[in-house]
Amino acid sequence: MTDDARLLAANARVAHVSLRGRVAAARYTEGERRRVCRPVTALRDDARPRARQRELVLHEVFVVLEEREGWAFGFAARDGYVGHVRIDDLGPDLWRSTHVVSARQSYLVGEPVLKTGDEITAISFGTRLSVLATHEDGRWGEVALLRPPDAMDGHKRADTMFVPMAHLRPADAPERDPVAVAERFLGTPYLWGGNSGFGIDCSGLIQAALMACGIDCPGDSDLQQALGQEAERAPERGDLLFWKGHVAMAVDAERLIHANAHHMAVAYEGIEAAKRRIARGEGPVTAVRRLDQPVALTPPRG
């Protein structure tokens, strides 16, 4: 286990039970699983509005270790990233996720009708949903939805809405090609610390692509540099290229894809051109890592 503060589930008052004997705390706890009840919420390194480090999307699990003054301290279940989330952005862990949004963005509506006049709720790639039933010959999924406190009807903690089934994949059916997943984000605005289809940064893009394929991946680029093995040959599809504070994924031997502040978006760039450009500001490539898992050459069929 690491003592990196980003992954150490402890503060001066409380620690996760796995840290007993390693970290001094007044209290040790397993924590309580909660789910995000807004389309996107910030995961902050401390309880300050400007301290955003990463993001969680709708229905992702956050394990709460402590609540203080409107903030929940704990860690993201997806990767163990530690931080603070507003308590009002979390709801109970009421159900098992059956599907995950696989499109860059999707939406929820109040009726399973194509030409609806309803206001939409925009949702991101990675949103976890429980499909209760399908409608219109399988075109629409009826899903359970957590509501934030300001949208609740009395004591009602959840509701149902409808989502296009074409935008989902089964939660137990991972994708096969991280590059193809990353390419769905082309044109997505660059957002430092972003983890959604509304805005994403370099390490957020890599994590989204790899985790959709069932490959464990930490949240920040320096942590991601431990993935796989050092590539001994020219970059191949799916290899990760690292600079100081930046990461990209090779599409083939000549191009990469990355979320970057130069384009302010997820974009393709020639590998050699990117090396020259980034070297002028951040220095040379620090590593090229080849994933342990084989990477498919084409997206899965069906």
Image (cartoon, rainbow, N blue to C red):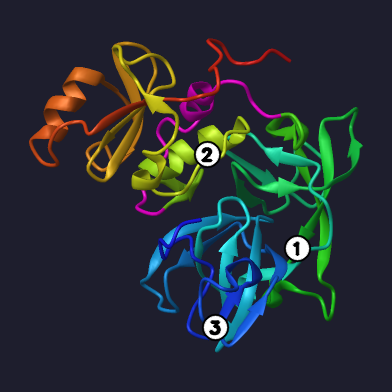
The part of the image, by quadrant, that contains residue 201 is top left
Left or right: where does residue 91 sit relative to residue 240?
right
Q: Where is residue 242 in the image (x, y as percent from the top left)?
A: 29, 34
Instruction: Give the CA distance from mark 2 to mark 1.
Output: 23 Å
Could you tell which of marks 2 and 1 lies nearer the N-terminus? Answer: 1
- What amino acid is labelled 1 in the image? Leu
Task: Sort mark 1 into few (<14), some (14-19) or many (20+) by Cα contacts within 10 Å.
Answer: many
Q: Which residue is drawn at 48% across and 23% down?
A: 179
- What amino acid is labelled 3 in the image? Ala
Could you tell which of marks 1 and 3 lies nearer the N-terminus? Answer: 3
Between 74 and 187, which is closer to the camera in this rendering? 74
Q: Name the residue under label 3.
A: 25
Could you tell which of marks 2 and 3 lies nearer the N-terminus? Answer: 3
Instruction: Give the CA distance from mark 1 to mark 3.
Output: 33 Å
- Mark sitting on residue 146: 1
Q: Where is residue 127 in the image (x, y as percent from the top left)?
A: 65, 47
Q: Which of marks 1 and 3 is in front?
A: 3
Q: Which residue is drawn at 45% across and 36% down?
A: 206
Vertical relation: 186 (above or below) 162 = above
Q: What stretch is highlighted in magenta?
A: 174-193
Q: Where is residue 238 in the image (x, y as percent from the top left)?
A: 44, 21
Query: Does the residue at mark 2 contact the one at mark 3 (Cβ under 8 Å)?
Result: no
SS under mark 2: helix
Q: Mark 2 points at which residue?
A: 208
Left or right: where does residue 35 sit relative to residue 53?
right
Q: Determine if residue 189 is in view.
A: no
Instruction: Give the CA distance from mark 2 to mark 3.
Output: 33 Å
| Total numbered labels placed on residues in the image | 3
